[in-house]
Image: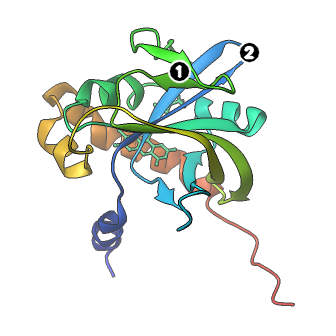
Amino acid sequence: MDPGQVYDLLRNLTTPVVAITCARSGRKNGMISDGVIRAGILPDVPRLVVQIHKWHLTHEIIAETGRFAVHLLRRGQIDVVTRLGFVSGRERDKLALLPHHPGAGGTPILDDCYAWFDCTVLNRMDAGFATFFLGQAVDVGRGTGDEVLEPQHLRDALPPEYRALYQPNLEAARALARPLAELPHPSRT
Ligand SMILES: Cc1cc2nc3c(=O)[nH]c(=O)nc-3n(C[C@H](O)[C@H](O)[C@H](O)COP(=O)(O)O)c2cc1C
């Protein structure tokens, strides 16, 4: 099948748009993801999986600290996406203008969101270009809003200057991912 068609099919598996935050020795950061999944059915054992590309500052911090927070965003929170999802924290302090407070383990929790999950890493899987971190929420909070930000809402509401950046950013990420895609075949024994 044509790779473009394959990606169109894969995009059906996209999840709500979330902000992922982390911190290391006072250095705070955040990024955007539309690939965070629920990883269990037990309400008293809230787990989720985030997939983070290895070249992101967020990856470096989570890999080292074993902590992150996931925030479901409200439908109107496009500004959070444009602040966190289009430039690396290596270039600027992206949380400077986003009000937040420290969670129990020091991870920044955004004051304004639909809901948040403050997590510790239980396990991790090397996916070549990314790491899948399995997190367990040690604290969960509900913010405000009636509807979470879905990818289609984002596509409809993204300002033109960011819309113009979306495809070039995706292509740049693909160029970084390509040489890291190979994984050793798992042993069958
Ligand atoms: C809608 C959207 C979804 C994204 N999903 C992911 C994702 O699932 N995993 C990932 O590693 N990066 C994802 N990104 C890219 C990062 O959010 C972005 O590159 C960010 O600037 C990385 O920041 P950092 O280097 O400060 O960690 C997404 C970006 C957008 C706009």
Q: Position of residue 22 (x, y in %)?
A: 60, 28
Where on the picture, by quarter, is residue 107? top right
Task: Check disc 2 and report its element: helix, strand or loop.
Answer: loop
Amino acid tagged 2: Ser
Distance between the Cα atoms at labels 1 and 2?
15 Å
Mark 1 sits near ligand 1, with its Cβ under 8 Å away: yes
Q: Position of residue 177 (x, y in %)?
A: 55, 51
The residue carrying mark 2 is 25
Residue under label 1: 89
Q: Which residue type carries mark 1?
A: Gly
Residue 51 left/right relative to 73: right
Q: Is residue 59 visible?
A: no
Placement of 138 over or under 35, stated as above or below: above
Q: Residue furthest bottom?
A: 189
Q: Quadrant of residue 187?
A: bottom right
- 171 or 51: which is nearer to us? 51
Q: Residue at x 29, y 67 (%)?
A: 12
| Spot occupied by residue 82 in the image (x, y as percentages of width and height) | 31, 26
Could you classify mark 2 by the number of other residues whose Cα lies within 10 Å: few (under 14), some (14-19), or many (20 or more)?
few
**Which quadrant is home to the N terminus?**
bottom left
Total numbered badges shown on the rendered structure:
2
